[in-house]
Amino acid sequence: MHEDIETILISEEQLRVRVAELGAMIAHDYQEKNLLLLGTLKGAVPFIADLARAISLPLELDYMAVASYGNSTESSGVVRIVKDLEGPIDHKHILLIEDIIDSGLTLHYLVDLLQRRNPLSLRICSLLNKERERIREVSVDYLGFTIPDKFVVGYGLDYAQRYRNLPYVGILKARVYEGESRPEKRHESVAEKGALKKI
């Protein structure tokens, strides 16, 4: 275990088993459908890579990234697309892949954006669901794990761009982020941070 990790919340083996289960469910539900797995950068990369291998169907992969206008200390809350899809989705069934659902702001924005592009269907798969009050409620169709409202890293989740490569999900020791207010906000995208400031 990494020296900065307080405890392992979800082990490498638990992740492997649950991803395989999710893959089997998705493969059952999307038989004979034109499936596109849409990941959000950067946190969902390890999850979507493992999940794609667990789905025994032909599928496509694509990624999106969002950010907000403003500088590092002041943000307008206006969301912009940093990386968009490579093509139209009106003839595809979209499964949006998230690493963690926290405030719900980014996911709510992406769902609204994608629905306006008229996919054949749009569902959500998230590895983690954090038990906390949502700013925006979202409906999840496939869920890996529900976790307590703790600051977690690993398997794609980061703190200051570190720990993404840990093979498990662990709770970060408080000493790593001592002096920062609400370190759990590190799980929010730049877009979420901007919206929170606006609120």
Image: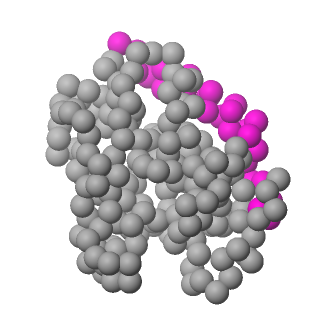
Q: Residue at x 29, y 55 (%)?
A: 82
How many numbered circles does the render carry? 0
The answer to whether residue 88 is left or right of residue 178 is left
Q: Residue furthest bottom?
A: 179
**Residue 193: image location, x then y, percent:** 40, 72
Q: Residue at x 33, y 46 (%)?
A: 64
Q: Where, quadrant-wise, is the C terminus in this rendering? A: bottom left
* Nearer to the camera, 73 or 136: 73
Main structural element of the magenta stretch: helix, strand or loop? helix
Whether the magenta-drawn stretch holds residue 14 is answered as yes
**Residue 187: image location, x then y, percent:** 52, 64
Q: Residue furthest top?
A: 32
The answer to whether residue 32 is left or right of residue 79 is right
Q: Quadrant of residue 161?
A: bottom right
Q: Residue at x 57, y 84 (%)?
A: 181
* Nearer to the camera, 50 or 19: 50
Is the residue 25 above or below the residue 176 in the image?
above
* Nearer to the camera, 187 or 84: 84
Whether the magenta-drawn stretch holds residue 139 is answered as no
The answer to whether residue 138 is left or right of residue 101 is left
Q: Residue at x 59, y 65 (%)?
A: 159
* Residue range (magenta): 5-32
Is the residue 60 above or below the residue 18 in the image?
above
* Residue 123 seen in this snapshot: no
**Residue 106: image location, x then y, percent:** 37, 59
